[in-house]
Amino acid sequence: MSEIQDPQLLVDLLEARSPTGHEFEAQAVLDREFETTADAYEKDVMGNRIARINTSGDPIVMLAGHIDELGLIIKHIDKKGFLYFDVLGGHDISLISGRRVSILTDAGVVSGVTGKRAIHLMEPEDRKRVPKKHELWIDIGAKSDEEACERVSIGDPVVYDMGFERIHGTIATARAFDDKVGAYTAFEVLKRIQTSGEPMDAQLVAVGTTQEEIGTRGATTSAFSIAPHIGIAIDVGHATDHPDTDPRKHGLFKMGDGPIIGRGPNINPFVYKRLIEVATAEEIPYQIEAEPRPTGTDARAIQMAGPGVAASVVSIPLRYMHTPSEVLDLEDLENTVKLLVAFTKSLKTGEHGIW
């Protein structure tokens, strides 16, 4: 289905540089699009963005996608003007060197490159090992610490300078599909239901959560404040249809085969069943993932908020998660939006996920 267009909201979120704890640019995208169009719109001290429609509806349904992404943070500037850093979120250290990066300073963006010793200058044993964080640096072309400190500061966040691009047909790559696609889905569902003008029983709350990559922190506070009956975390899941994965360990999930619906203790049985029923009725392809423990998503926080929430996880299959060039199928993303639009519309007053 190569006729699927690049959704502008998704592209804007992907272009937004929003390392965890510094989600300003992604917040601005959501503010611009929804602050005056949603029935109610909230900002909180964690930086979450919360849009509501049908504010007197029942049940209250929370769709959450996190707007933070992996990043780096400047930790030390040496006498020669090279910048040393720590990581924001879970990085594969072997992938950091040799990247173009954007440093987000109070005065604007500073460009740089992550460096390490060239292979020609390494001893044979050095070539076999992954460098440690403190052995990597960022080069901004400064000649001294004084010059570097005029342009950057300790604590400035950093992201890879890697944009959105179509590879072929509906297959695309970007640095932060995890989890700009989840945030896009939550707010796109809200937009489509609102513009359809069709009545529904549920109140829908779309949330762009912050700091998921360091412990689902924004989801923890927003779920308490919203007090939803039903809460679905929309995230990315591992597509295992590429070399060097073992389906016996991780399951088999394919790009193009539809959203991944979680099943297990973190997943409310009522919500799981309804998602399957809706997908079947709407002829939306889907995959099922066994989740034996609290998931590594916002759902782990949402489920335990207040007296408890009927939680679920819906994931978009993604190859090469937490790398600078993640890959997914935009058709899976569109089917995820369709699934959650139909799910939300299917809910009747009093359906709170009690089982």
Image (tube, rainbow, N blue to C red):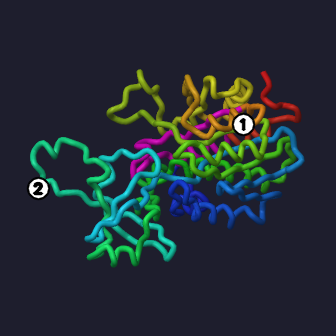
Q: Label 2's element?
A: helix
Q: Does the magenta segment cover residue 219?
A: no
Q: Would you name the residue on which mark 2 appears?
A: 120
The foreground one among 225 and 244 is: 225
Task: Tell me which numbered mark, 2 or 1, is placed earlier along the sequence.
Answer: 2
Q: Label 1's element?
A: loop
Contact, mark 2 vs mark 1 (Cβ under 8 Å)? no
Query: Toward which corner of the image does residue 314 lie, by quadrant?
Result: top right
Q: Can the viewer see residue 6?
A: no
Tag nearer the camera, 2 or 1: 1
Q: In the picture, which quadrant includes the C terminus? A: top right
> What's the amino acid at mark 2?
His
Count how many numbered circles sit on residues in the image. Answer: 2
**What label does residue 305 carry, if any?**
1
Kindly identify the residue that appears in the image at 10 percent across and 45 percent down: 124
Relative to residue 35, is residue 291 depicted above or below? above
> What's the amino acid at mark 1?
Ala
x then y, percent, for residue 99: 32, 59
Q: Can the viewer see residue 342?
A: yes
Kindly identify the residue that appears in the image at 54 percent across and 48 percent down: 179
Kindly identify the residue that appears in the image at 69 percent across and 46 percent down: 221
3D distance between C-alphas at marks 2 and 1? 54 Å
The foreground one among 317 and 50 is: 50
Relative to residue 142, is residue 353 depicted above or below? above
Query: Toward which corner of the image does residue 344 lie, by quadrant?
Result: top right
x then y, percent, for residue 162: 41, 60
x then y, percent, for residue 6: 55, 58
x then y, percent, for residue 116: 23, 57
Kindly identify the residue that appears in the image at 30 percent across and 71 percent down: 81
Which stretch appears magenta? 311-339
